[in-house]
């Protein structure tokens, strides 16, 4: 990694016009394993602006979390390697930055919320200590000051009786409360961007609703960008502004939320939407996408989805479809829409 | 308690024929102890605290509820994997909680279980053939020794796996395939009842539908009765004839899928339904959502009276004093044909269409 770029990022909070808050550009990530090279991310590009929610939708092994970890700079390298691609935060490439400069971005400017709050918190330290550590290390506050800020934060994420609970340990909190503490920790340094990796998957539905509600309110209040990584089509429909659907390490479809649900342009997205049992329609046989997600050691040639695709033709088995611009009936491109399918037109209209 | 159960049974339109399983006042309390050498019981976690319902032949009864509501403990009690603290489970008129040894073994042949996690419920050192065929070691009367490989191959075929995979090991399969192996093992003894505890929760969305379809197909083919335990309300609705909602060790509402999903009368059911994210962004701003305050209380120390009252927006003083009974609410008793007339354990039941508002 280059060490030439030592300009402190984040001093200026102004984004050069025309650049997004965060841009991932043709990112590739691979892992060296005993069985060979696993290509987890194969040319992913997406962007998110302040105040915007991007949902990255995909199943296990689609590369959605690995992309996020690359953005955060928390991939274990090796075994991971980033052979090419750029990740730009306010126009600056994070991947060529010095470790020191990167550290000033991580946590302070881009923060992450993980799925499993119990294993992400240190069980032998009180939550108050862990929260105030952020202020002591990054802001150089005194213990007392930092503790007071920790209580503020716990109040802000609506933990009842924050003052009394600040000296409790993680195991003394319920799952929903622990996830709130994770959110508090992510918010501590007032980041511009939050990456939430399956933040509510481990929670019960009623608690999930509370936590998503909280996250959406805070995002609005602080005008943050939010990247929500999930496999849950319901959660996505509730909060996303735009969606990137991933399959086998690639983005197969991008679209604004309403358009994606109304009129998907990729057979994989279409299949996913059809296979959800809807509360308002008790069907006979559920639509099921045939087959299994591919092994990343051995991604099918051509379009990775072709062995499972009902529309697959000969061309799909040989030629990798690029992310086509999706156009409306009169041929004008629809803003933000793309589909990596040779037959996106047929999918859109069929 | 038994009286409540009868009401529950008669009030439900879908149920036909005689019940194959009758659960009456089932309780499971796990003791909380203090002290290392001299253990003293200082309380009990009331995981299941008086649950009554019936399972009819050929039907699917869905049980929904959040973590800690006792739904998985109920499953274990029905298999007699846990010893019930109180209550009865009648299988064909026989109380299986009192059985042991050979008699219990005979009953268990007819009640099989499919577990949530296909990664931990299959022994990694056994081949698929041994895993699926293992039940025959315990019940040799079902398949004579020479016949077993053939039976296992048939089972693999039935659950949609290649019979050639018989000598493979679990790690060579994906999550969805492993769940099929678990289902094949559950079917091996040709049971009448299958208790499926979160059978699709660990699977990817695209694979979930395959397994749900498989379970539905097997039910038709083998005339199985299912108890389908899950927290995913849309999957439960899809597969269930009747649905029971549990909260903190109690059944709070039970009825046909239509009664529960379209005409819920218990506030907890309503909150649960409204919290489910609807996979349709249209109208998300206008959607009515009941946000419950706080968390589920500890089952070691449940609230007095109605257990939901600490989170209920309708709770009044009387809710702390009277424990509501699971029965058809008085206000709906005069109209037995109404969908709202189904058992609901609330002092102030009120029909509210949650799903309809989302349409």
Image: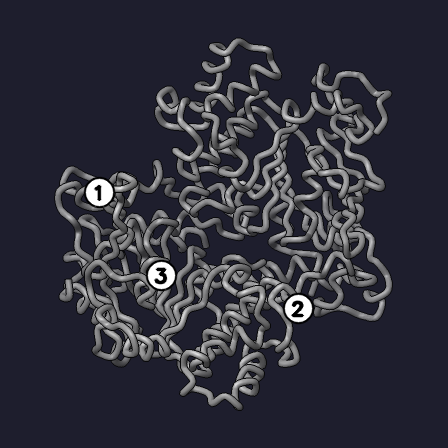
Hey, which residue is sitting farthest front in the picture?
B37
Residue count near mark 2 (Cα–Cα under 10 Å), binned few <14, some 14–19, many ≥20? few
Q: Chain of mark 1?
A: B
- Res A291 label: 2
User: Can you tell which quarter of the image residue B178 is in?
Assistant: bottom right
- Asked if residue B47 is positioned above or below residue A159 in the image, the reply reads below
Q: Nearer the viewer, mark 1 or mark 2?
A: 1
Observer-nearest of B253 and A324: B253
Q: Are marks 3 and 2 on the same chain?
A: no
- Asked if residue B222 is positioned above or below residue B127 in the image, the reply reads below
User: At 66% across and 80% down in the image, what residue appears?
Assistant: B164
Element assignment for label 2: loop
Q: Chain of mark 3?
A: B
Q: Chain of mark 2?
A: A
Using the numbered discs, state the Cα–Cα distance from disc 1 to disc 2 in whole angstroms: 55 Å
Residue count near mark 3 (Cα–Cα under 10 Å), binned few <14, some 14–19, many ≥20? many
Q: Position of residue B301 (x, y in %)?
A: 24, 41
**Disc 3 marks which residue?**
B63
> Mark 1–mark 3 contact, CB under 8 Å?
no
User: Tell me, what colour scheme is on the image?
Assistant: one colour
Element assignment for label 3: strand
Decide if residue B337 is in sight here: no
**Disc 1 marks which residue?**
B40
User: At 74% across and 22% down in the image, what residue appears?
Assistant: A15
Observer-nearest of B194 and B34: B34
Q: Quadrant of the C terminus of chain A?
A: bottom right
Using the numbered discs, state the Cα–Cα distance from disc 3 to disc 2 in whole angstroms: 29 Å
């Amino acid at each position: 990694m280059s060490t030439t770029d030592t300009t402190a990022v984040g001093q200026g909070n102004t984004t050069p016009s025309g650049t997004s808050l965060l841009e991932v550009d043709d990112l590739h990530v691979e892992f060296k394993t005993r069985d060979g090279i696993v290509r987890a991310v194969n040319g992913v590009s997406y962007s998110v602006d302040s105040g915007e929610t991007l949902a990255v939708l995909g199943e296990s092994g689609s590369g959605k979390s690995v992309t996020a970890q690359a953005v955060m700079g928390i991939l274990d390298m090796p075994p991971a390697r980033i052979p090419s691609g750029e990740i730009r935060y306010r126009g600056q490439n994070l991947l060529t930055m010095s470790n020191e400069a990167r550290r000033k971005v991580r946590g302070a400017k881009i923060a992450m919320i993980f799925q499993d709050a119990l294993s992400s918190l240190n069980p032998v330290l009180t939550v108050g200590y862990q929260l105030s550590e952020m202020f002591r290390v990054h802001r150089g506050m005194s213990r007392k000051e930092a503790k007071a800020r920790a209580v503020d934060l716990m109040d802000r994420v609506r933990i009842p009786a924050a003052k009394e609970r600040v000296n409790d340990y993680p195991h003394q909190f319920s799952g929903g409360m622990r996830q709130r503490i994770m959110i508090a920790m992510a918010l501590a340094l007032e980041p511009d961007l939050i990456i939430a990796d399956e933040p509510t998957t481990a929670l019960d539905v009623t608690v999930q609703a509370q936590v998503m509600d909280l996250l959406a309110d805070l995002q609005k209040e602080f005008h943050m960008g939010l990247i929500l990584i999930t496999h849950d089509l319901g959660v996505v429909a509730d909060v996303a502004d735009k969606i990137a659907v991933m399959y086998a390490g690639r983005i197969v479809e991008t679209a604004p939320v309403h358009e994606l649900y109304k009129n998907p342009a990729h057979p994989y997205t279409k299949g996913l939407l059809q296979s959800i049992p809807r509360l308002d329609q008790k069907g006979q046989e559920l639509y099921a996408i045939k087959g299994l997600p591919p092994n990343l050691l051995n991604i099918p040639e051509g379009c990775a989805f072709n062995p499972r695709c009902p529309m697959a033709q000969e061309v799909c088995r040989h030629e990798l479809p690029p992310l086509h611009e999706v156009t409306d009936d009169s041929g004008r491109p629809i803003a933000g829409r793309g589909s990596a399918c040779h037959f996106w037109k047929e999918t859109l209209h069929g | 308690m038994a009286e409540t159960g009868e009401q529950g049974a008669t009030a439900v339109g879908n149920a036909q024929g005689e019940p194959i399983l009758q659960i009456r006042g089932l309780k499971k309390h796990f003791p909380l102890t203090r002290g290392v050498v001299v253990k003293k019981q200082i309380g009990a976690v009331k995981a299941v605290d008086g649950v009554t319902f019936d399972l009819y032949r050929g039907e699917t009864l869905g049980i929904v509820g959040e973590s800690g509501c006792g739904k998985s403990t109920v499953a274990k009690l029905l298999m007699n994997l846990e010893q019930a603290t109180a209550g009865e489970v009648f299988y064909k008129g026989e109380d299986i909680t009192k059985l042991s040894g050979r008699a219990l073994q005979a009953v268990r042949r007819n009640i099989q279980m499919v577990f949530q996690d296909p990664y931990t419920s299959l022994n990694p050192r056994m081949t698929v053939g041994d895993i699926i065929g293992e039940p025959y070691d315990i019940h040799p009367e079902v398949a004579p020794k020479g016949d077993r490989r053939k039976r296992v191959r048939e089972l693999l075929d039935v659950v949609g796996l290649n019979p050639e995979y018989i000598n493979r090991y679990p790690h060579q399969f994906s999550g969805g395939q492993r769940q099929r192996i678990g289902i094949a093992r559950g079917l091996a003894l040709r049971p009448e009842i299958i208790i499926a505890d979160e059978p699709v929760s660990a699977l990817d969305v695209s694979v979930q539908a395959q397994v749900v379809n498989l379970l539905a197909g097997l039910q038709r083919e083998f005339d199985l009765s299912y108890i389908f335990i899950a927290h995913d309300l849309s999957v439960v609705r899809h597969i269930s004839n009747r649905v029971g909602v549990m909260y903190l060790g109690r059944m709070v509402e039970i009825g046909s899928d239509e009664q529960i999903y379209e005409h819920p009368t218990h506030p907890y059911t309503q909150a649960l339904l409204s919290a489910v994210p609807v996979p349709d962004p249209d109208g998300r701003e206008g959607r009515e959502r009941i946000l419950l305050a706080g968390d589920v209380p500890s089952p070691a120390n449940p609230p007095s009276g109605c257990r939901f009252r600490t989170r209920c927006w309708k709770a009044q003083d009387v809710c702390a004093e009277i424990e509501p009974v699971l029965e058809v609410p008085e206000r709906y008793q005069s109209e037995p044909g109404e969908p709202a007339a189904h058992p609901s354990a609330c002092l102030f039941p009120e029909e509210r269409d949650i799903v309809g508002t989302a349409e």
